[in-house]
Image (cartoon, grey):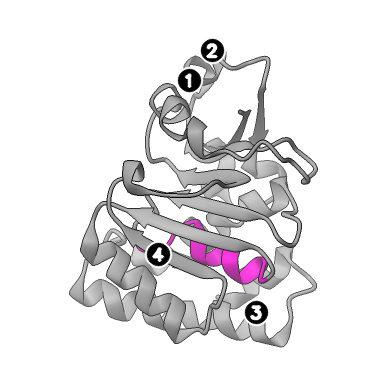
């Protein structure tokens, strides 16, 4: 199913293609031991998880040298697919659940990702600053913004000012209403044709 990635990202290097292809073997193998993806959803790995993560890559082209935190990464989404796409960008993957971080760590090592670091623990234990915090349906924006504000670097050099980029589904109007002056909402269906994305959104909040 690497084809579904190549369909939307035409300029993948041979190494990137190999890394994306390897995910199709590694995640099902791990899922037999640790349930990081719903058992009934593992067959949809490439569309529902990998491609969905890459909606952020359609929303913004992270500049080399950017530093990104993936909050609540679980087994590595959206961080690992994004780290493959942006090899010159650093990604710090954080999750409270040790066994999920173990999966993400093993997958990153198996495919030779050198731009990923991982941390088992609460976001309050994270040190350093980041250009963006990304997440995939982890928590309400009203909880997330105050939680991560202190991590956002003041020095912006990407096309958008530094902030949060979240992947969410359904009606997000309530969450975004408080931040409408500093928020952008994109429809993932504008990037990808698959029916799964009809109700999916990318939400950006400048911090």
Q: Secondary structure at mark 2?
A: loop
Q: Position of residue 168 (x, y in %)?
A: 49, 37
Q: Secondary structure at mark 1?
A: helix
Q: Position of residue 184 (x, y in %)?
A: 68, 28
In the rendered image, the residue lying farthest to the left is 33
Q: Position of residue 64 (x, y in %)?
A: 74, 62
- The residue where tag 1 is placed is 175
Q: Residues within 10 Å of mark 3 (few under 14, many from 20)?
A: some
| Mark whose residue sits in front, 2 or 1 | 2
Q: Residues within 10 Å of mark 2 (few under 14, many from 20)?
A: few
Which of 49 and 106 lies nearest the eye of the viewer?
106
Q: Which mark is residue 190?
A: none
- The residue where tag 4 is placed is 118
Against 178, residue 44 (above or below) is below
Pointers 3 and 1 in contact (C-beta within 8 Å): no
Q: Position of residue 21 (x, y in %)?
A: 54, 82
Relative side of 102 to 105, left or right: left
| Mark whose residue sits in front, 2 or 4 | 4
Q: Is residue 177 visible?
A: yes
Which of 199 and 59 lies nearest the eye of the viewer?
59
- Could you tell which of marks 3 and 1 lies nearer the N-terminus? 3
Q: Which residues are magenta?
A: 75-87
- The residue where tag 3 is placed is 16
- Could you tell which of marks 3 and 2 lies nearer the N-terminus? 3
Quarter of the figure with the N terminus? bottom right
Q: Secondary structure at mark 4?
A: strand
Q: Which mark is residue 178?
A: 2
Q: Residues within 10 Å of mark 4 (few under 14, many from 20)?
A: some
Q: Could you tell me which residue is drawn at 68 percent across and 15 percent down?
A: 181
Q: Quadrant of residue 8?
A: bottom right
CA gap, disc 2 to disc 1?
Answer: 7 Å
- Could you tell which of marks 3 and 4 lies nearer the N-terminus? 3
């Amino acid at each position: 199913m690497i084809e579904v990635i190549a369909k939307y990202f035409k300029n993948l290097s041979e190494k990137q293609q190999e890394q994306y292809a390897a995910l199709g073997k590694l995640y099902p193998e791990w899922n037999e031991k640790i349930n990081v993806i719903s058992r009934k959803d593992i067959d949809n790995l490439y569309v529902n998880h990998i491609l969905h993560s890459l909606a952020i890559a359609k929303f913004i082209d992270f500049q080399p040298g950017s530093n990104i935190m993936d909050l609540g990464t679980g087994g590595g989404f959206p961080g690992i697919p994004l780290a493959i796409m942006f090899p010159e960008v650093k990604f710090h993957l954080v999750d409270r659940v040790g066994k999920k971080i173990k999966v993400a760590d093993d997958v990153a090592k198996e495919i030779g990702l050198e731009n990923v670091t991982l941390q088992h623990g609460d976001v309050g234990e994270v040190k350093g600053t980041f250009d963006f915090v990304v997440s995939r349906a982890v928590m309400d924006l009203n909880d997330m913004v105050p939680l991560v504000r202190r991590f956002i670097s003041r020095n912006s050099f990407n096309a958008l000012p530094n902030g949060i980029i979240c992947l969410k589904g359904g009606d997000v109007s309530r969450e975004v209403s408080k931040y409408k002056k500093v928020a952008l909402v994109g429809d993932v269906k504008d990037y990808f044709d698959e029916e799964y994305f009809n109700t999916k959104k990318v939400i950006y909040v400048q911090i």
